[in-house]
Image: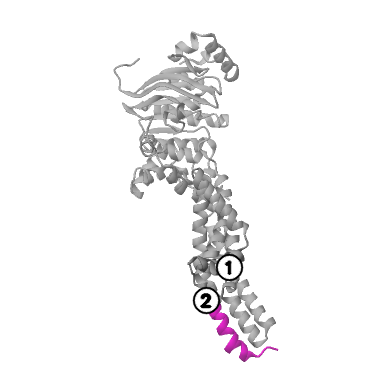
Amino acid sequence: MVNPDFIINILAPSLLEGLQMTIKLIMYSAPTGLGIGIIIASGRVYGNWLLSRFCRLYIVFFRGTPLLIQLFILYYGFPTIGISFSPFTAATLGFILCSSAYHAEYIRGAIQSIKSGQILAAQSLGMSKMSAIVNIVLPQALRRAAPGCSNEIIYLIKYTSLAFMVTCIELTGAGKIVASRYFEYTAVFLAVGAIYLVMVSAATHIFHNLERKFAIPGIE
Amino acid sequence: MEQNKELILEIKDIHKSYNGKAVLKGISFNVFKGETKVIIGPSGMGKSTLLRCINQLTVPDKGSVWLKGQEITHRDAKNINKLRQKIGFVFQDFNLFDHLTAVGNVEIALIKVKGMKKQEARNKAIFELKKVGLEKQASLYPAELSGGQKQRVSIARAFAMEPEIMLFDEPTSALDPELIGEVLSVMKELANEGVTMIVVSHEMGFAQTVADEILFLDGGKLLEAGPPEKIFCEPKYKRTKKFLSTLNELYGNVEGNKR
């Protein structure tokens, strides 16, 4: 049986501190990742040859290599060319790059499912192509991509645990430290796992409500 | 015809080819204020391409288009966006914005292009929807509208921009037969109000009652043009006659229901 004293005085404070870092990582990388994903997807579909090519390469690179390797390159590799990031910055940057590549693919699919006639109609009313993309295409594409993008953010919540590998002490890292010091692996990791489960459930609930709130007949 | 009227649109020697195949081989005609021109002709002969060349959704290979003396062709992107709002365009398959309600569809360009205040745009949009008989459907989304209602919204959307001319690209051919009438009657009303329009359509009854001139487009050229009585009763060319008789077989006798 785990000592309640250990839970209250040692485990809870460390996990709480780690959790704060985890939430900070999510809050910085989830919206930015989504935003960049939207830009990359639009660039890939509507950009000129060069931009489209660049966006495609971006996706190939960040979706095609392990996130952990990206984090290692950012944190351990970049200082050798004179660019050093703090653990938090390196982790956040890695998460943004990786998650934006996945968002971009979900959103690209959604953009391509929208009839191109709507852009023609917007242009015939005097809108520029850019305005048509922003005002007509993206509001629909984002609704269609929502299930995929929600999924990606839920994934992100869990892969923030990789931040520990570049010495950014978040929830998993804090748990690992306490667990090895006090030799309480089972209890600590059960608690850590439960906290992730709560976060994911909360996020699922929020996304579900958002999807419902912005639902429009005929667009799913 | 009607030379005393103001010249709205000049189309000069428009050429367009796709993959080496010439679709339009030098089309020229003028449209005067208040005129309704109906373009007919076999499918795949460039009727839609011609309409799109007018508002530059398709860029012609050669030739020029002038709106009230202002050249529309050979413009940079920024200028053409501005000029396009003066040319209303109604598409065969409506192309309504699926994420916006009927009123949203009509008001978005008023806000984003004309820079109207939201309330002002809303009032104008409701006014235009009323004109096409859809004020009750203002808050419905495209998925909740019938085909005929969608097309009426798209007419209201184009007309709200107060264009100099309206272009209709087979506005009824994607509709179920029982819904065609409501769209045609809106178009007739516009024509009677003196709206200048070019209509690509095979609705011969509409052409007969509303058109000032029928243009027969075949083989990439304007084969024949004239008032409906002339085109329908005494066409100059065999090709025109043959085409009209095909339509007759499909839609019933054109000459039988003259005005």
Q: Nearer the viewer, residue B85 or A48?
A: A48
Up-down: is A213 above or below A192? above
Residue shown at 49% from the left, 8% from the top: B236
Label 1: few (<14), some (14–19) or many (≥20) C-alpha neighbours in 10 Å: some
Q: Magenta includes A20?
A: no
Q: Give residue A48's position: percent from left, percent from top.
A: 49, 43
Q: Give residue B176's position: percent from left, percent from top.
A: 58, 31
Identify the residue at the far left of this view.
B4
| Chain hosting mark 1 | A
Residue for badge 1: A72
Q: Nearer the viewer, residue B176 or A128?
A: A128
| Corner quadrant of residue B10 | top left
Residue for badge 2: A20
- Callout 2, which amino acid? Gln
| Corner quadrant of residue A102 | bottom right
Residue shown at 53% from the left, 80% from the top: A17
Residue shown at 54% from the left, 24% from the top: B20
Q: Give residue B258's position: percent from left, percent from top.
A: 48, 15
